[in-house]
Image (cartoon, rainbow, N blue to C red):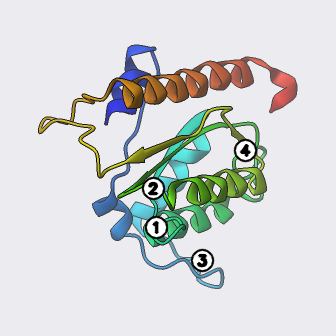
Amino acid sequence: MFALQAAEALGATVRYFDGPFLARLPIYTPENQQRTVEQQELVAAVREADGLILVTPAYHAGISGLLKNAIDLLEDLRNDTRPYLHNRAVGCVVNGFGWQGGGTTLVSVRTIVHALRGWPTPIGVTLNSAEKLFDAEGACIDVKAATQLRLVTQQVVEFARRFATDTSAK
């Protein structure tokens, strides 16, 4: 939520798809072309977006199955004028209990973004949830984490605006 609030403060229009929403998405199978309302909503939001922030827990040095399933659904964008994540700024944030899996998971998320023709921001963020980073209301109370989250958000918003105004990029 911290990154969403930071994006809104920069004038961005934001959409939030949380874990419970992603859990309602059926498992992606390419042969099944029928889409639920939730799948349609997610694909439409990404189609309209100029930037995204992908956040995932580090599960055994990999991304969550919920996020991977949602990303697989972006195959529906393959025939668009702007396919997949083409020329979209994408911030990558990884959260894990400890530092060990964060770096590997961050590399994985960035690799996926590249494979989908997106532009990962120069900064990627890894957070260690073994440390107290947020208060009960969701405010970031760790100065380093807040600085990194603001920076990744600022990069997504700035790069998204540049891509949106560059007609050759579309």
Mark closest to the chain's N terminus, 2 or 4 = 2
Q: Nearer the viewer, mark 1 or mark 4?
A: 1
Give the CA separation, mark 1 to mark 2.
Answer: 6 Å
Residue 148 image point, x, y percent: 48, 28
Q: Which residue is mark 4?
A: 118
Classed neighbour count for the residue bearing mark 1: other residues with Cα under 10 Å, few (<14), some (14–19), many (≥20): some
Q: Nearer the viewer, mark 2 or mark 4?
A: 2
Q: Which residue is mark 2?
A: 56
Please tell me whether mark 4 sits on a helix, a strand or a loop: loop
The quadrant in which the N terminus is found is top left
Residue 89 image point, x, y percent: 66, 34
* Cβ–Cβ under 8 Å for marks 2 and 4: no
Quadrant in the picture for residue 74: bottom right
Badge 1 amino acid: Ser
Give the CA separation, mark 2 to mark 3.
Answer: 26 Å
Give the CA separation, mark 2 to mark 4.
Answer: 17 Å
Mark closest to the chain's N terminus, 4 or 3 = 3
The quadrant in which the C terminus is found is top right
* Cβ–Cβ under 8 Å for marks 1 and 4: no
Residue 64: image tag: 1
Give the CA separation, mark 4 to mark 3.
Answer: 24 Å
Mark closest to the chain's N terminus, 1 or 3 = 3
Q: Which residue is mark 3?
A: 33
Badge 3 amino acid: Gln
* Cβ–Cβ under 8 Å for marks 1 and 2: yes
Image side of residue 134 versus residue 49, left or right: left
